[in-house]
């Protein structure tokens, strides 16, 4: 029996229609902790998609909008029928590869405390845990911050403290 993950193609989305389809997929997520900002999604530096053998979109993830050589990973979504097949890991590996190609020095991601699957995916990809902080959305949620250094000469403490800002740390 072939490995189901091998039937999936992971690539950088080029067409506006495919990027819009990825946005719709994220919008359909079942946890919907907060509404998707479509404009921010469409402005992402890179949208990575996973498609099955029939070309159907089954997953996506982005390197969020921003400037400079520090970037945020986000909006990872795999269609429920395709979960537990390594697709999230493949999407994350592709984002890291593309970030390196873009000259990104430091990647970071934030994940709600209860989202164990995303947390585990980030850690398996090589990201490191920075700390837990209260959400700035006023929800009372705890959000974990993660980072991955992609280039030499990165002062992680300085950069992460800038990113975290005045959020309240929870330990």
Image (cartoon, grey):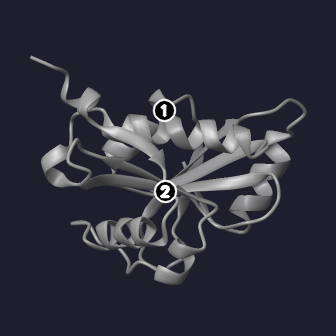
Q: Which residue is mark 1?
A: 123
Residue 75: which quarter of the image?
bottom left
Point 51% across, 69% down: residue: 135
Taking depth in this image into account, of 100 and 151 the one nearest to the observer is 100
Q: Counting residues from the N terminus, which is met first, the one under dot 2 or under dot 1? A: 2
Point 46% across, 81% down: residue: 38
Residue 119 makes an appearance in the image = no
Whether 151 is drawn above or below 45: the answer is: above
Whether 105 is drawn above or below 19: the answer is: above
Secondary structure beneath label 2: loop
Tell me the mark number nearer the camera, choosing from 2 and 1: 2
Whether 73 is drawn above or below 38: the answer is: above
* Residue 81 placement (x, y as % from top left): 13, 49
Residue 163 makes an appearance in the image = yes
Point 38% across, 45% down: residue: 118
Question: Going by the picture, which residue comes out furthest to the top?
Answer: 1
* Residue 41 placement (x, y as % from top left): 51, 72
Q: Which residue is mark 2?
A: 13
Q: Is residue 140 left or right of residue 114?
A: right
């Amino acid at each position: 029996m072939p490995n189901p993950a091998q039937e999936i193609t992971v690539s950088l989305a080029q067409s506006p229609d495919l990027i819009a389809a990825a946005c719709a997929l994220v919008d359909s997520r079942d946890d919907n902790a907060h509404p998707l900002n479509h404009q921010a999604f469409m402005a992402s530096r890179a949208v990575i998609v996973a498609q099955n053998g029939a070309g159907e979109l089954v997953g996506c993830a982005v390197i969020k909008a921003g400037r400079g050589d520090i970037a945020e990973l986000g909006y990872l979504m795999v269609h429920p029928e395709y979960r537990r097949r390594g697709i999230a890991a493949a999407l994350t590996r592709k984002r890291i590869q593309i970030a390196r190609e873009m000259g990104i020095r430091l990647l970071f991601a934030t994940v709600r405390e209860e989202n164990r699957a995303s947390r585990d995916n980030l850690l398996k990809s090589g990201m490191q845990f920075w700390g837990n902080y209260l959400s700035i959305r006023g929800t009372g949620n705890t959000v974990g911050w993660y980072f991955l250094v992609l280039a030499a000469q990165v002062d992680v403490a300085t950069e992460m403290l800038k990113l975290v800002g005045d959020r309240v740390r929870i330990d």
